[in-house]
Amino acid sequence: MKELIQNSIKKAKSYIEYKKLISDLIKEGKSTGINQNDELLNYTKLNEKRMKRLDKKTKLSETAILKSQKIEKNFTWLILTESWCGDAAHTLPVLNKFAEANSKIDLKVVFRDENDDLMNQFLTHGSKSIPKLIVIDKKSNTVVNSWGPRSKKATNLLNEYKEKNGKIDTHIKKELQYWYNNDKGKSIENDIVEFLDIMR
């Protein structure tokens, strides 16, 4: 696992580099990932706009900032994602705000389809769901925590819909985006605050 983590980190991009890559790919009519089609490109374009907006508007609570600033060890926050992922577009800007609050957190981004072996170590109920945050102690190169692909509240929303309707469809996916817009990243923030204590 340690070698797998090291190799993945070597290929990883900073948040700024990740956003620039997405912008460059859009100009070429592409998204990240193995599959390329108009639908994924359109999602990527939409997600770029979402991230730009959220980068400007997202503000952590004082509690979250203080929690982040209390971290004393050096950590890598390695995020598995793809440009077309709607959940990631709402999540990465929030995670980046935690990293901005403390230089001990080194946020890095890798692509799921290019890191299948790593993704397979962090499945969600057998699924390659993204985004997936992997928290790594830099000194020992060991994984101390993981999170994702969604906040507990968003996960509950989807689970309740699936239980009632038997599947996840286009309707609930649209509803989830409305929910994200209204939640303004607070549920993600609350989830991350909950496990920051073990990283101190």
Image (spheres, rainbow, N blue to C red):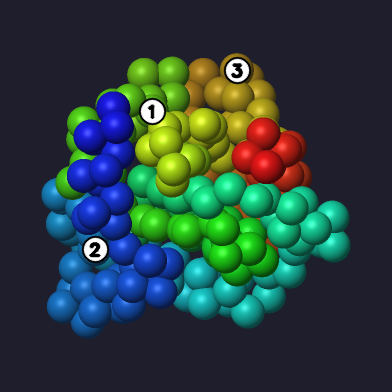
The structure residue drawn at horizontal position 38% and vertical position 38%, both measured from the top left corner, is 141
Q: Residue 125: percent from the left, percent from the top?
A: 43, 18
Please give the count of numbered marks on the rendered protein: 3
Query: Horizontal and vertical percent for residue 168?
Result: 48, 31
Question: Where 71 sits versus 44, above or below?
Answer: above
Q: Disc 1 to disc 3, how far (Cα)?
A: 24 Å
- Across and down, in percent, residue 40 comes to 28, 58
Q: Is residue 6 visible?
A: yes
Name the one closer to the observer, 85 or 6: 6
Residue 15 pos. (x, y %): 42, 67
Could you tell me which secondary element the residue under label 2 belongs to? loop
Identity of the residue drawn at 52% across and 51% down: 74
- Quadrant of the image containing the C terminus: top right
Report the residue marked by disc 1. 122
Which one is in front, 72 or 82?
A: 72
The amino acid marked with disc number 3 is Glu
- Crowding around mark 1 (Cα neighbors within 10 Å: few <14, some 14 to 19, many 20+) is many
Where is mark 2, residue-wise?
31
Alpha carbon separation for disc pair 2 and 1: 23 Å
Give the mark nearest the N terminus, 3 or 2.
2
Is 170 on the left or on the right of 27, as rendered?
Answer: right
Q: Nearer the viewer, mark 3 or mark 2?
A: 2
Q: Quadrant of residue 181?
A: bottom right
Q: Does residue 110 lie above or below 130 as drawn? A: below
Query: Which residue carries the number 3 mark?
Result: 163
- The answer to whether residue 161 is visible is no
Q: Which residue type carries mark 1?
A: Phe
